[in-house]
Image: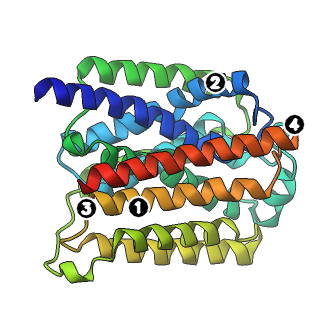
Amino acid sequence: MLAQRRSERRVAVASLVVLSAVGAELLAAYNDTTGRPLALLGNLIFFALLYGCPALLIRELTRRTGRGWTTMLLLSAAAGLTQAGLLDQSLFAERYDDVRGWEESYRATAIEPLGVSAYMLQNFLLGHIVYSFCAPIALVEAMCPSVARRPWLGRAGIVVATGLWLLVAGAIFADAGYATLPELAVTLTVVVALIAAALRFGGRASRTSMGAGTPRAGTVLAVSFVAATAHALMPDDWVGTAGAFLIATAAAAGLIRAARGSAWGLPHCAALATGVLLSRGALAFTYYPVVGHTSAAAKYGHNVVMLGLVVAAGVYAARRSAG
């Protein structure tokens, strides 16, 4: 039994670093590595360190301290803000590398005194919380139910994950330069406040006895897919930003209510994660990369493979968590 759990923890760790990279970047298929296997392999390794290592550390801290998803969400928000506001500093960039349409999108909801775009702020932050960290964590925990609430890393694993993340984080920070010193200071203050809140208010949520009020896993999958799609399709102007905020708020309220039911479990978590990731993968078919150029065959081949990976992971997680 001990050897089996050790093996399952290794599978869980490997699965999470890969799914975090896929959910955060590769599933969206937005740059010129789309459909180029060797370039994608390099990106997979890089993004696995950039997103997968923080995902492991977020989950490890949460599970080791006996906390729940409130902690996971707040720590994910801190990690997402660190990425967008401190490391690559895209949150403060009026133009970003060779990304087509960036300046127009930024200007549509620019808040000049803060140096940010309201649309990009909510989109980046929520995107990292959902796709980079929480959805991959939820899906992998459902894939490995026997260790879903147990720590996955030993002390050496924590040190290695932290060191590898710092390595790539330092490389990104050294190449950035979009934020001013006051912007970096304010961002760092908010990150620290989010971490403090995660450790202060992140206890396990109480469960109600109303199991009949818990939706079926299939319903959770469908609703999460629709909500994520509706959020992503909001235009990048002020009306769209308000609409995206309302969708996210309504979805969060519904999720909190459903998750408090006594019948809520790993199958529901798997369905929720699969629904949002399927939405991201499906929407990637509707646009071409915004960086560089790629052929139609390479683009759609990439989309099919990434979406297939999500489907396979979702089916496997549903079966493991239900059985």
> Given the image, on which type of amino acid does mark 1 rest?
Ala
What is the distance, in whole Å, between disc 2 and disc 4 at their CAs?
18 Å
Q: Which comes before the other along the chain, label 3 or label 2?
A: 2
Reading the image, the residue beneath label 1 is 271
Question: From the viewer's perspective, is the residue at label 2 or at label 4 nearer?
Answer: 2
Reading the image, the residue beneath label 3 is 265
Badge 1 marks a residue whose secondary structure is helix
Q: Is residue 178 above or below residue 109?
A: above
Drawn side of residue 192 relative to residue 30, left or right: left
Q: Residues within 10 Å of mark 1 (few under 14, many from 20)?
A: many
Drawn side of residue 42 relative to residue 50, left or right: right
Badge 2 marks a residue whose secondary structure is helix
Q: Which comes before the other along the chain, label 4 or label 1?
A: 1
Reading the image, the residue beneath label 2 is 41
> Horizontal and vertical percent for residue 106?
79, 57
Q: Which comes before the other along the chain, label 1 or label 2?
A: 2
What is the distance, in whole Å, between disc 1 and disc 2 at their CAs?
28 Å
- Nearer to the camera, 180 or 217: 217
> Given the image, on which type of amino acid does mark 4 rest?
Gly
Badge 3 marks a residue whose secondary structure is loop
In the picture, the quarter occupied by the N terminus is top left
